[in-house]
Image (tube, grey):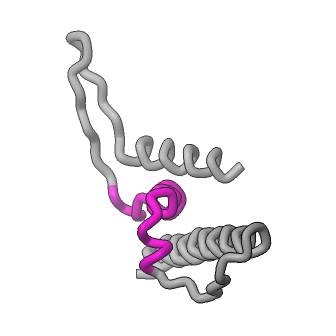
Amino acid sequence: MQSYQLVLQPSAKLFALVYWKHLLKIVKERLQKYLKSGHFYDSKTSMTEISKRALFWLEVLLCCVYLLPGVTGEISVLQLNNIVVYRYEMIGTSWNILGRLYLL
């Protein structure tokens, strides 16, 4: 049970950081509108407003998804009359590397 908590805690923290990033982005956009054209500034932002953004969910999917410990298996694909086998661990590691490169 403790190994699953180790995986879920960083995911929850990353989700909170991605949420905070998008919240600040919305506030910044509103401040810029207010300063440039004098539009009404509303400092209240709801979760639904942030969750409507596709980029938010893309970042959550990219940064917060991990393969749980103990999950193992294989996927085999036939390509050009050859059998190619991918292990879940390799796919999960590739996904995490892609997320880390995005964060750079």
User: Is residue 61 within the magenta segment?
Assistant: yes
Q: Magenta residues?
A: 48-71
Query: Residue at coordinates 52% horizontally, 71% vertically from top-left?
Result: 11
Q: Residue at 47% of width from left, 81% of height from top? A: 47
Count of labels in the image? 0
Q: Is residue 49 left or right of residue 14?
A: left
Residue 98 inside the magenta-drawn segment = no
Could you tell me residue 74's position as x and y percent? 28, 41
Q: Nearer the viewer, residue 12 or 20?
A: 20
Of residues 75 and 36, the one nearer the viewer is: 36
Q: Residue furthest right?
A: 35
Q: Position of residue 41 (x, y in %)?
A: 67, 83
| Residue that appears at 36% across and 46% down | 88
Position of 82 with respect to 70 (left or right) is: left
Residue 89 horizontal/vertical position (percent): 42, 47
Question: Please, which residue is most extreme toward the bottom here?
Answer: 44
